[in-house]
Image (cartoon, rainbow, N blue to C red):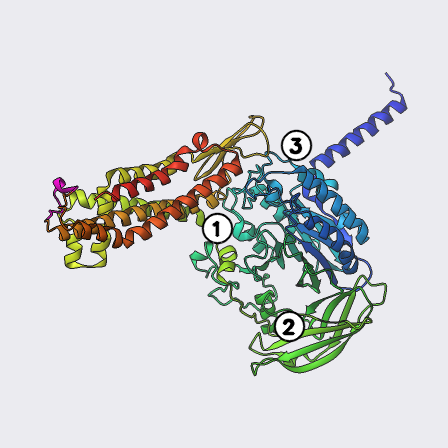
Amino acid sequence: MRIPIFLLLFIAITTLHGTTAEQQQNQNPNERRSRVIQVKQGPEDVVWVVQLSDLHFSVHHPERASDFRKLMGPVLSMINPSLVLITGDLTDGKSKDLLTMKQNEEEWVEYRNVTNEVIERSGLDKSIFYDVRGNHDNFGVPVVGGSYDFFSKYSINGQLGRKQNVNSVTLQTGDQKHLFVGFDSAMTVGLRGPTNLFGHPTDQLLTEIDSELSQWNSTSTKLVTKITFGHFPLSFSASSNSGRSLKDIFLKHSLSAYICGHLHTRFGKNLKRYHRSGHGFLSSQKFFQPNMHQTPSESIKNCSSGAPPIEEFWEWEMGDWRKSRALRILAIDRGLASYVDVKLNSGSKKTIILPTFPLDSRFMSRYSLEEKYECQHMVPQSYETIRTLVFSVSPVLSVVAKVYDSISGEPNLVMEELMRKLTDNSSRGDLYATLWNYRAFEDPSPTRFWLQIEVTDVMGRLTLSELRPFSMNGLSAKVSWTWKEFYVMGCQWAALYYPIFWFGLYFFFFILIVPKALFIFSKRQYTFKNFAANGGFINCIAWILQELCNMHIVWYGTLGYLFYLILCPWFIGQVFTEGGSRGYMTYMGWVVKTSDNSERHEYIGSPDVIVIVIPHLLFAVLPTILISAALAAERRIYREHVLSLSGKKKDDHSPKNERPQVHHYQGGRRSKSRLGKRWIRKITLVICLAVIYRHLMSCRALTKAYEMNPLIHFPVYSFSIPLLLLYVVYKTGRI
């Protein structure tokens, strides 16, 4: 049987088309994501991008969106960046009283409309804009792609069809490549706040990030500058199920920087952290990094030609748009990254200055540059000029570089040179440079010499850059964190949660059970008379805790409550934006079902529950135990005082004397003493009321956050602490 030629052709074309479609489906998703932008026009070897973070567009604060609409279009037009990165918390998702946290579609519509308007006014291509999901953008989202996943619908990435969790783009200038990898590490099942605070990278996400960062390793003959961007700082990022972390991936690829948001500016201005690999670190650095600059104990210099690159990177958190109206410009000049943060809360800036070389010695990749200096691997053309980017709404008349010497304690001007523009008027931006003798500024102190750039435009406006220390030796200037900065950047809270929780529980059990055991099994009894006769800190503590043990209802009630916190759900609440399904929270996280009850998720939101668990232990359970012990001890002291006034003798160990009869002679004196000298009890009662008030306010906040009824959804959590304290007050008030 002969088949017509046209039929054979049709079958071949159909088969070929099907094979191509199947190949496209089976293609590595990382290959489909890769995108290369050829950065045209000058200046060569320099690219710059803009970062924005934590916009928090809110229906209750319309000024955030209106200021963004008014300011960002002209500013982006002036800067003309190659990329614009918006690192999370695009919308606020909070009620007016800040207690209910779930998605609000009206805020997302506003975000889409405002950003589209800004992009149009800036004259930039929409495809160079990348936004990532923050925890606020994930409040109450049961499933990605569902009806309440407004990020996938209204974000810039969503509008452009970037549905994957990892997106990469490469900026290429000549033979230089600058790889930017953005990722979404928000939890896959979005809980309502406040238990939605941490990034939760999965093993699959880490594999995808690793793959994206490796894409140019085998094809490029020159080193590739690698930048990653996301929402969560590493101190607020959990490890994956296998124990891997984002830090492991970033160190493996020797990033220039990881840029992020999330913490805003209320915790400090130096929310930066230097990361370095090595085996000489203290094991405690898994939990703490006491200084901004992580310092290994072993020598790291390796001058051999085939030495691998030093595994290091900087983590640069930036301020927020929400209150500070902050914007960051990050530049890469011949592989060296630098940045400047600009605040627009006082209006648009007419001139912005970003020095690109020499680098700020406080925030540079310290060991790689130090190794270049010590091993004489420095590239002369990279060091022989001072370079700076200048962005201005008006033509620039002059740019002057000034170097100050601070060896005397006061800045002393030692160099002043006029800088010239390196490119013509068709350039993407203005890069200015001037020759200098960089070897004259080699010094063992990384803060001796300071650089400042002075710009004058045709309107006569004079703009000065921030004074920045620099070090030609590659030495890094030390910057100390404030206490608040250490609290949010130096503490690895995901690793600290369970050690803190179990330490607290073991401590509570210890101070309850050990004194009880001593009271039952030990021949020696720790009493007030024993303490009064012998003194000693140990005797005092043992006596106070045994007084607590003698209050049986309080002792057993507190012990039972501790077991409740370990074994039982703390409360039952509405965890998604809408829907009838509820979940319950334990110290290990939430157990929830999806809105259609098709899937059960166990213990999600860990360690996010730390924001409820640890404050409850610290500000409710611990004060309850201490207040109970203090009031019990005060009652014993006062009883002894009353007995001494009445002339009665009392045996401490006689149960018959639980309520001694006090004679009524000297009644006025007794009454006066009772009212006037129980000042310890009065102070303790004030503290007791403060603890009850704070606990009730916390319960009120949780009631609003998860739409709960205290009597139905968390009665034990709500009322145990107040009832225990009120009973202690009643019991110890009886003599």
Residue 116 is one of the magenta-drawn residues: no
Q: Looking at the rendered structure, which numbered label has been put on residue 493? A: 1
Residue 541 relative to residue 380: left or right: left
CB atoms of marks 1 and 3 within 8 Å: no
Is residue 583 in sight in this rendering?
A: yes
Q: What crowding class fits label 3: few (fewer than 14 Cα within 10 Å), some (14-19), or many (20 or more)?
A: few
Q: Quadrant of residue 136?
A: top right
Q: Which residue is mark 2?
A: 467
527 vs 658: above or below: below
Residue 709 relative to residue 368: left or right: left
Secondary structure type for disc 2? loop
106 vs 246: above or below: above
* Amino acid at pointer 1: Trp
* Amino acid at pointer 2: Leu
Secondary structure type for disc 1? helix
Residue span colored magenta: 649-659
Q: CA distance from mark 2 to mark 1?
A: 34 Å
Give the mark nearest the N terminus, 1 or 3: 3
Q: Which of label 2 and label 1 is nearer to you?
A: 2
User: Residue 70's spot in the image, x, y percent?
Assistant: 75, 53
Q: Which of label 1 and label 3 is nearer to you?
A: 3
CB atoms of marks 2 and 1 within 8 Å: no
Q: What crowding class fits label 2: few (fewer than 14 Cα within 10 Å), some (14-19), or many (20 or more)?
A: some
User: Residue 353's spot in the image, x, y percent?
Assistant: 72, 67
Count of numbered badges drawn on the protein: 3
Q: Which residue is mark 3?
A: 147
Give the mark nearest the N terminus, 3 or 2: 3
Nearer to the camera, 582 or 34: 582
Q: Quadrant of residue 729?
A: top left
User: Residue 309's spot in the image, x, y percent?
Assistant: 60, 61
